[in-house]
Image (tube, rainbow, N blue to C red):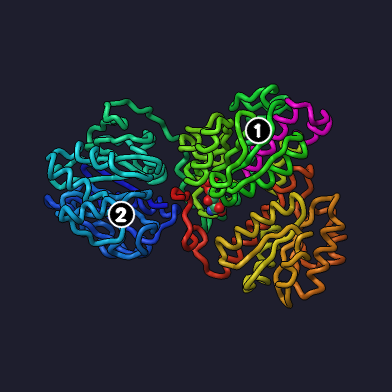
């Protein structure tokens, strides 16, 4: 969601802030702004729209001189996207400037109190309340850090803040509670940011602020304080990403680059965890006795991560014989789930910062359920709070629509399934060996889905169908899980209304929506259900649907008898097939979106990590 960048040093701040913000665009935003201390006063420039608008307004930063400042990309929550609601927000008397990521839940109450104390407000935002509250205490205490501390103590909700005070040039205060914030060490200069890509050009030496932290920063120093305002040391980390991880490297979009990175990402996730033909999960401390006493596994996640959970249900239940229920994280807390020490709550999140998922995980912890998180971002909130973590080594994912994170999450589900099944003795050794052997080839088979020839074929079908108004994705069993993800991709980036259904369910209602020309993407790879799935497909075809089929290479001829438009993927062990079937669906959505001139990496209204509930 919102992106924060802050800079203190000897270089011109505004161009650095603008560049940093451009690296956070992927988080999703609708307006942007900067505040720079210039000639002794805090000067703000902000505008609704893309960064290009702000860039134009301040001539790439040249129009505001000054060597320290804060910048922000806003994803609207309180108040519509507009110039006035954009950040940074100035307090009434112009002494305090604030950028904020998160939500202040009690802002209305605070605003009423501040209005009574004579403060005036320009915007509809919760953030302006923070600026005014700090200024109120600053006027009373004449001490910037203490004023921040007093104000923060009254805030409820989630917030990462970057704060400047006009009377204290050269000092910035950063505060973190629940929303992510990073401090970056430079040489005679220092930085803050919401995420690593904004800092990569300048430093790799960072600190992830912890909840409750307040950092007092100058260009040469930083002091960290905890929630009690006690001085603390924070662990310095070194980012080892290749800078290309945050660049497009010749691809037109991050999404396309990330689709093509999937063989490497999947290999990087699987291969360190397979040794001598066995799955080894050093990452977790789960014993056979614990698993044998388990009554239930919940899988809790949002969006694509949830769809990985839906696939996980089929795999874990079938192989480990433990009841598994995937639940949307936003619903989990409010559905009174039955859980306790004999429940494992598997939490899946690329960002590790998704507010709904984190809240669901904390609820599980309150009920003494064990939590196991599958997370991509190292050091993220969910990774830090979970009892056990398995990282997906996908590398940074920039495009809002997930691809390689989805694939690596699925790879971890395979690893967990095999690991649990072996411990529980619910899998035949020969079957175990055959799956492990296929897993080691999965990256090569994904590469086969991405050959120039296959991509061209998918592009051809995208050209046939890109004008579709509606689409259905149908499949059975694991294919149904893949359909959910394929359908979400088309909605997210191509803005086509699309629904995913279990193929057998169609005749119970939704088939009434099928008419001449309706696009139906049918995924048929599950051997045992092939004939049934084909019958469902013929049912929609005979009602006028245009069917695009996805099947395995060995089924192509049989498939074509009924459906001429077919994309094939290589065969693998049936349990692993979703990792291959999803690839053409990702590419199909990508090319459809391209032909519809959509903003593929930053689809409208969406944010990469959703840090509000
Ligand atoms: C996927 O393409 C989406 N952008 C979205 O559904 C995402 O998977 C969801 O918001 C969960 O994010 P997380 O994995 O970072 O928790």
Residue shown at the point (30%, 54%) measured from the top left: 108
Secondary element at image label 1: helix
| Real-space CA distance between mark 1 and mark 2, rounded to the nearest whole angstrom | 52 Å
Q: Tell me the mark number nearer the camera, choosing from 1 and 2.
A: 2
The image position of residue 58, as x and y in percent, is 25, 61
**Residue denoted by label 1:** 271
Of 394 and 94, the residue lying toward us: 94
Residue shown at the point (31%, 40%) measured from the top left: 175
The reply to whether discs 1 and 2 touch (Cβ–Cβ < 8 Å) is no
User: In the figure, 563 relative to 579: above or below?
Assistant: below
The image position of residue 502, as x and y in percent, is 74, 57
Of 485 and 204, the residue lying toward us: 485
The image position of residue 582, as x and y in percent, is 68, 52
Q: Is mark 1 within 8 Å of ligand 1?
A: no
In the image, the segment drawn in magenta is 407-436
Q: Which residue is farthest bottom?
A: 516
Q: Which of the two discs, 1 and 2, labels the residue nearer the N terminus? A: 2
The image position of residue 578, as x and y in percent, is 71, 48
Q: Per the image, is 412 magenta?
A: yes
**Left or right: where 529 falls relative to 283:** right
Of 312 and 60, the residue lying toward us: 312
Q: Per the image, is 240 magenta?
A: no
**Left or right: where 413 falls relative to 179:** right
User: In the figure, 512 relative to 81: above or below?
Assistant: below
Kindly indicate the quadrant of the structure image that contains residue 336: top right
Secondary element at image label 2: helix
Q: Is residue 486 visible?
A: yes
**Residue denoted by label 2:** 108
Q: Is residue 250 visible?
A: no
Instruction: Using the image, tell me which numbered label, if any, was put on residue 169.
Output: none
């Amino acid at each position: 969601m919102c992106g924060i960048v802050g800079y203190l040093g000897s270089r011109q701040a505004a161009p650095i802030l603008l560049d940093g913000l451009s690296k956070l665009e992927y988080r999703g935003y609708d307006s942007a702004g900067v505040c720079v201390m210039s000639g002794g006063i805090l000067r703000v420039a902000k505008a609704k729209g893309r960064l290009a608008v702000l860039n134009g307004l301040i001539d790439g930063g040249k129009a505001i001189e000054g060597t320290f400042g804060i910048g922000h990309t806003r994803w609207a929550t309180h108040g519509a996207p507009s110039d006035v609601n954009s950040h940074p927000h100035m307090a009434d008397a112009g002494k305090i400037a604030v950028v904020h990521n998160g939500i202040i839940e009690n802002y209305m109450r605070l605003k009423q109190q501040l209005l009574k104390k004579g403060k005036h407000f320009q915007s509809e935002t919760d953030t302006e309340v923070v600026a005014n509250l700090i200024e109120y205490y600053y006027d009373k205490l004449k001490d910037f850090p203490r004023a921040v501390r007093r104000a923060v103590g009254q805030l409820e909700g989630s917030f990462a803040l970057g704060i400047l005070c006009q009377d204290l040039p050269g000092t910035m205060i950063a505060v973190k509670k629940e929303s992510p914030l990073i401090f970056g060490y430079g040489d005679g200069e220092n930085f803050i940011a919401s995420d690593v890509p904004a800092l990569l050009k300048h430093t790799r030496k960072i600190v992830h602020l912890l909840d409750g932290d307040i950092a007092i920063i100058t260009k040469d120093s930083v002091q960290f304080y905890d929630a009690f305002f006690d001085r603390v040391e924070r662990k310095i980390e070194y980012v080892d990403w290749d800078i290309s991880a945050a660049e497009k490297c010749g691809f037109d979009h991050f999404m396309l680059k990330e689709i093509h990175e999937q063989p490497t990402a999947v290999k990087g996730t699987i291969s360190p965890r397979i040794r001598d033909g066995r799955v080894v999960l050093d990452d977790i401390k789960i014993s056979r006795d614990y698993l044998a006493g388990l009554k239930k596994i919940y899988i809790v996640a949002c969006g694509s991560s949830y769809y990985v959970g839906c696939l996980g249900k089929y795999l874990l239940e079938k192989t480990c014989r433990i009841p598994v229920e995937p639940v949307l994280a936003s619903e989990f807390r409010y559905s009174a789930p039955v859980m306790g020490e004999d429940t494992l709550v598997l939490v899946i999140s690329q960002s590790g910062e998704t507010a709904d998922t984190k809240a669901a995980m904390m609820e599980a912890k309150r009920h003494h359920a064990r939590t196991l998180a599958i997370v991509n971002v190292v050091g993220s909130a969910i990774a830090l709070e979970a009892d056990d973590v398995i990282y997906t080594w996908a590398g940074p994912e920039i495009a809002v629509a997930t691809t390689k994170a989805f694939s690596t999450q699925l790879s971890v589900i395979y690893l967990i399934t095999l690991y649990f099944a072996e411990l529980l003795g619910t899998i035949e050794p020969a079957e175990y060996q055959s799956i492990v052997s296929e897993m080691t080839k999965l990256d090569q088979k994904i590469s086969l889905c991405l050959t120039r020839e296959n991509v061209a074929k998918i592009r051809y079908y995208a050209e046939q169908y890109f004008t579709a108004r509606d689409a259905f994705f149908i499949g059975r069993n694991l294919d149904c899980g893949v359909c959910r993800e394929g359908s979400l991709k088309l909605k997210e980036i191509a803005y086509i209304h699309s629904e995913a259904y279990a193929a057998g369910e169609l005749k119970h209602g939704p088939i009434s929506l099928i008419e001449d020309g309706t696009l139906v993407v049918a995924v048929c790879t599950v051997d045992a259900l092939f004939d049934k799935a084909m019958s469902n497909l013929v049912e929609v075809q005979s009602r006028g649907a245009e069917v695009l089929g996805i099947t395995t290479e060995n089924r192509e001829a049989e498939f074509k008898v009924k459906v001429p438009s077919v994309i094939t993927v290589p065969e693998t062990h049936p349990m692993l097939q979703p990792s291959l079937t999803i690839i053409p669906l990702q590419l199909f959505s990508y090319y459809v979106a391209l032909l519809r001139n959509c903003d593929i990496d930053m689809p409208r209204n969406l944010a990469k990590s959703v840090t509000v509930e």
